[in-house]
Image (spheres, rainbow, N blue to C red):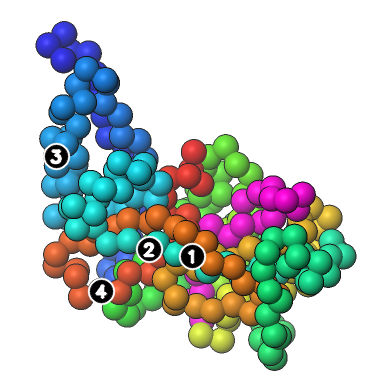
Amino acid sequence: DPGAKIVGFTGFIPHDYELDGNVVPGLMTTTFFVSEAYRGKAMSMVLRAERYARDFHLVDGSPSEKMKLILDRLKYERFSVETQYIYCVRQAGLAPRAVASRIGSAVLRQGPRAAFRQSSRFTHQPDDVVSIPSRRDDKLRKRVTREGLSWFMAAGSETKRLIAACDAEGTLLAYGIGVAKKARGLTLLRITEYASFDVSAGLDALFCHAATHPEAFGLSGEFDLLVWPILDGSARGKGFLRLRRPAALYYKVPKRLRYSRKVANPGEGDVPLL
């Protein structure tokens, strides 16, 4: 305002993405605020922030209802539905049908379950990861680094848990990071970020192993269910239960990268970092 008092601001959290092995800078929207007396300036602030879309991959994972309307007008793309695959943790002693009746889901028919290679090493410590492979294809996704894993685990107010598999040399094969949630008297580990770096190291096999061997990941006695939400259909789980829930992950890709395919994680918004 004329007195140099801040009456509005937009907050972003920088995070690198990757496409065909190259780094793409990204910004996650975290906070948008305008004082009541200056609400007429809100759209100009949005348009000013929109200029970043020329060079950055923009993501908003927790927009308000009013902001959703604005993002739709600005031609943001979005993921509006997430499919949740739910795994019963062995030591919790819960029967899938009993859980299904409590959360309103049907039990999935179980096919052959994938298994991880016997030489894999499982861990819940980021420091056990020695290296992370680069991925070269036409998919735009969050860049994963050793430093980034440690930072994400420590960020925010919620305690996070790492579920990871490495080869004998410590190269990361697949991982998931989850946060604890309570729902209908059950304690859930909701996976908010995940990735696989080896075609033979499927995420379903990793999460199934975590549910049947929770002690390997420091999860013993803490959780009833492991929940794996998928936004983009790039993977499919074989959990005991499957639910579909509304989601709201909005994003915009720089024009020069419009040919790419967006790979989404539920944790791309700011919520896991607050």
Location of mark 2 (residue): 79
Residue labelled with disc 3 = 48
Q: CA distance from mark 1 to mark 3?
A: 31 Å
Q: What residue is shown with label 4? A: 260
Cα distance between the residues tagged 2 and 3? 24 Å
Circle 4: element type: loop
Q: Is residue 189 magenta?
A: yes
Residue placed at 19% from the left, 32% from the top?
42
Depth check, mark 1 against mark 4: the one in front is 1
Q: Residue furthest top?
A: 3
Is residue 145 in view?
Answer: no
Task: Please state if 217 lies on the left or on the right of 95 as rendered.
Answer: left
Q: Residues within 10 Å of mark 4 (few under 14, many from 20)?
A: some
Q: Looking at the picture, which amino acid does disc 2 mark?
A: Phe
Q: Which residue is mark 1?
A: 82
Q: Which mark sits nearer the N-terminus, 1 or 3? A: 3
Dot 1 or dot 4: first in sequence order is 1
